[in-house]
Image (cartoon, rainbow, N blue to C red):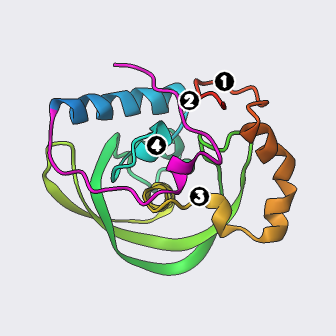
Amino acid sequence: MAIIPIVTYNDSVLRQDAKPVKENSEELQQLIDDMFETMYNSNGVGLAAPQIGKSIRLFVVDTDVMTEELEEEENVGPLVFINPEIVKTDGNEIKMEEGCLSIPDVRDDVNRPEMVEVSYLDRNFNKHLIRTEGWLSRVIQHEYDHLKGVLFLDHISAFRRRLHRSALRKIENGKLEISYPVVPKS
Ligand code: NI
């Protein structure tokens, strides 16, 4: 397994529409293992393939660190989502603070629907349909956005975005000290 440097804000791969994964392969399984290692190394709860420079429809999630203190939510452990499709969202719009490994040091409140229903293939290419609320729903919706080239900053107001301008500029200029490996800015 290997830790892969994470692509940061303003890299064009974060703005692309990711391509479907065509087939299982040794490389894909290796990539999934590396994505988990990369995510845990940076204390993340989700990581999408575009964030390591691969524009394919794949993300990994592990929200157990967030849910283990909450008795009302089950720990579901590591999950792999290949070619996910959001079938439905429902419930009230809920405001929650989000961050992103590609946008270090920037956090803000984002409104999203409470419930999400998503179909996907697991790492063995078995098909699943999951319906979830709470943290897991939030993380899935955030990672799913990455596959469409959308960042959580796109969901906040222009006014709020302006408040983050200097932090974003630091990331763009490679001036921010980040505690995990990132792709150097050229
Ligand atoms: Ni993110």
Q: Could you tell which of marks 2 and 1 lies nearer the N-terminus?
A: 2
Q: Are marks 2 and 1 in contact (CB under 8 Å)?
A: yes
Between 20 and 79, the one lying in front of the other is 20
Sequence-first tag of 4 and 3:
4
The quadrant where residue 27 appears? top left
Mark 1 or 3 closer to N-term?
3
Considering the image in quadrants, where does the N terminus appear? top left
How many numbered marks, from 0 up? 4
* Label 4 sits on residue: 47
What residue is drawn where x is 31% and y is 35%? Answer: 32
Is residue 58 visible in the rendered image? The answer is yes
Which residue position holds label 1?
A: 179
Circles 4, 1 touching at the beta carbon (< 8 Å): no
Specify start and end residues of the magenta stretch as a single range. Answer: 1-25
Q: Is mark 3 within 8 Å of ligand 1?
A: yes
Q: CA distance from mark 4 to mark 3?
A: 12 Å
Is 69 situated left or right of 88 in this image?
A: right
In three-dimensional space, the C-alpha distance between marks 4 and 1, rounded to whole angstroms, equals 16 Å
Q: Position of residue 179 (x, y in %)?
A: 66, 24
Secondary-structure class at tag 3: loop
Q: CA distance from mark 2 to mark 1?
A: 7 Å
Three-letter amino acid code of the residue under disc 4 = Leu
User: Tag 3: residue type?
Assistant: Leu
Q: Tell me which label, 4 or 2, sits earlier in the chain.
A: 2
User: Which label number is shown at residue 142?
Assistant: none
Question: Label 3, on which residue?
Answer: 151
Mark 4 or mark 1: whose residue is earlier in sequence: 4
